[in-house]
Image: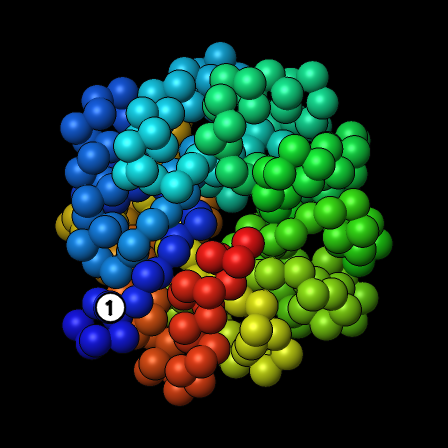
């Protein structure tokens, strides 16, 4: 481990678990194990991300995480769903995905008692633009992602107050898919921050270089780590979905889609160094951009 990795205050805004456990685990000791794993592998502070569940289950998971927010073990809670596109569901159960309503979002925020820091929304969904504006007014980070939307959807979301893109280039179209797309709007025609899973599987090296060429000051490294981070290859689950981890890469058993990662912040930084990315950009991506947000 280099001094760069061990001494910096690296912030992970998107992490679901590690050491064999998820942050949704009902046993607080298991949640502590997941937090401790990441904090011993380069993460100084993190948001605990929760995947899509039925709303009553999600509320219970939120309630269980509040003590970890109160004792500063985590910086807050990130809801990655249920307001996502079924066409870009990734490792979320598609039957549970739906359009946002302000009443439901308010009820989730009430349960969170001020500790829900971020919610990801696909901006093309009915009610999404209003929801993004509402979240911004409440001081909650409105992230956009898991979207089948287009160029105009991206720009409307930014105008409404979206501040971050959830795992840019994943759960949306790729940079090579056309000139006027969701991805190109975000990279070339906005100032929005871009999450990047730098495990060298989620985003090609060429696309990483393109992203840093055009948005070096807007990248936010995240792990999107699932329970298998720090664990051997094998069979795991994300919510109700079965996952196979082989050679450290997590994929859904049913269709082979990427299903989170086994990444750590130290590994992300090592990958950035191996790609020859500028040290200032690496520091901003692992720490400063997330801190400012």
Q: Residue at x 53, y 58 (%)?
A: 292
Could you tell whether 275 is left or right of 155 in the image?
A: left
Vertical position of residue 135 compared to residue 202: above or below:
above
Q: Quadrant of residue 188?
A: bottom right
Q: Residue at x 78, y 45 (%)?
A: 160
Asked which secondary structure carries label 1, the reply is helix
Q: Which is more toward the observer, 112 or 52? A: 112
Q: Which is more toward the observer, 185 or 105? A: 105
Residue 47 x/y as whole percent = 41, 43
Badge 1: how crowded within 10 Å, few (<14), some, or many (20+)?
few
Residue 8 x/y as whole percent = 30, 67
Q: Quadrant of residue 84?
A: top right
* Residue topped by disc 1: 7
Query: For the image shown, how many numbered marks are present on the structure?
Result: 1
Residue 31 x/y as whole percent = 24, 32
Residue 214 x/y as whole percent = 64, 79
Could you tell whether 123 is left or right of 203 in the image?
A: right
Q: Residue at x 64, y 47 (%)?
A: 144
> What colour-coding does the image apply?
rainbow
Vertical position of residue 136 compared to residue 188: above or below:
above
In this view, the residue farthest toward the top is 56
Residue 263 in view: yes
The C terminus: image quadrant: bottom right
The N terminus: image quadrant: bottom left
Q: Residue at x 60, y 61 (%)?
A: 193
């Amino acid at each position: 481990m280099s001094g760069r990795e061990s001494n910096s205050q690296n912030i992970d805004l998107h992490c679901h678990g590690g050491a064999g456990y998820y942050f949704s685990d009902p046993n607080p000791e298991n949640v502590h194990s997941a937090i401790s794993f990441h904090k011993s592998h380069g993460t100084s502070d993190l948001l605990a991300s929760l995947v899509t569940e039925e709303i009553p289950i999600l509320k219970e998971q939120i309630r269980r995480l509040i003590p970890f927010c109160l004792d500063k073990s985590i910086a807050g809670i990130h809801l990655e769903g249920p307001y996502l596109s079924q066409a870009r569901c990734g490792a979320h159960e598609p039957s549970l995905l739906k359009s946002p309503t302000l009443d439901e979002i308010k009820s989730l925020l009430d349960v969170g008692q001020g500790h829900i820091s971020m919610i990801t929304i696909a901006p093309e969904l009915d009610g999404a633009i209003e929801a993004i504006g509402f979240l911004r007014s409440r001081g909650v980070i409105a992230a956009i992602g898991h979207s089948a939307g287009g160029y105009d959807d991206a720009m409307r979301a930014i105008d409404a107050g979206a501040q971050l893109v959830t795992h840019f280039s994943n759960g949306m179209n790729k940079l090579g898919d056309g000139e006027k797309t969701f991805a190109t709007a975000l990279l070339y025609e906005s100032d929005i921050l871009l999450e990047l899973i730098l495990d060298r599987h989620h985003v090609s090296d060429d696309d990483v270089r393109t992203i840093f060429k055009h948005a070096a000051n807007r990248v936010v490294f995240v792990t999107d780590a699932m329970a298998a981070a720090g664990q051997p290859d094998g069979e795991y689950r994300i919510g109700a979905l079965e996952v196979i981890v082989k050679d450290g890469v997590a994929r859904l058993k049913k269709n082979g889609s990427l299903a989170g990662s086994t990444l750590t912040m130290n590994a992300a930084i090592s990958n950035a160094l191996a790609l020859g990315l500028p040290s200032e950009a690496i520091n901003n991506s692992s720490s400063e951009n997330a801190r400012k947000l």
